[in-house]
Amino acid sequence: MHEGPSKPNPWQLVLYSYGRKVLPPSMHEWVANDLAGPRAAWRTVVRFAIPCFIILVPFWFFPTSVLNKATMTLPIFIPFVYFAIALNKIYRRARLRHHGLDPDLVDVIAREREADLHADYLAKYGPRDERPGHT
């Protein structure tokens, strides 16, 4: 195990959350849990949404109707969140790779959850044929 703190301080967390800092090896377990553990997808979407939200908040102070405010901000915010959700796994894989960790950690929880389904498939149909070009 590496010497040093196992969790980032608030400043390191902010820099880490927005891709500006690679945390030291002593924090790799924390990074792996943050990017591949429970609720990792949710944390990533929230981290994506916060800067967009901060940029759009001033529009809500314009002296106009709520409908007008919504039409100024929601067409930006909704696609932003949509793409944060769509690219979530790709972004988390890249962040794991950036920290020198295995990008396949992103799928560990799904593999554990679907292990019974996979075992049933193997029992019923047998292993896949791995020959190139064979379908």
Image (spheres, rainbow, N blue to C red):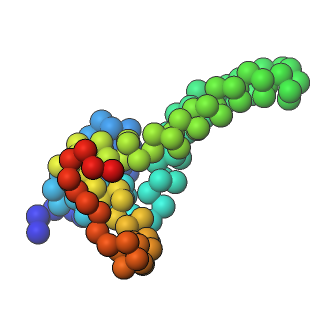
- Looking at the picture, tell me which residue is in the foreground, 19 or 104: 104
Residue 97 place in picture, x, y as percent: 23, 46
Q: Residue at x 36, y 47 (%)?
A: 92
User: 68 above or below 78?
Assistant: above
Q: Is residue 42 visible?
A: yes
Q: Residue at x 38, y 42 (%)?
A: 90
Dividing the picture into quarters, in which one does residue 20 lie? Answer: top left
- Looking at the picture, tell me which residue is in the foreground, 89 or 39: 89
- Looking at the picture, tell me which residue is in the foreground, 43 or 108: 108
Q: Is residue 54 visible?
A: no
Of the 4 image quadrants, the one containing the N terminus is bottom left
Q: Residue at x 25, y 44 (%)?
A: 133
Residue 83 place in picture, x, y as percent: 53, 35
User: 50 above or below 57?
Assistant: below
133 vs 41, left or right, is: left
56 vs 103, left or right, is: right
Q: Report the number of numbered marks.
A: 0
Dividing the picture into quarters, in which one does residue 3 lie? Answer: bottom left
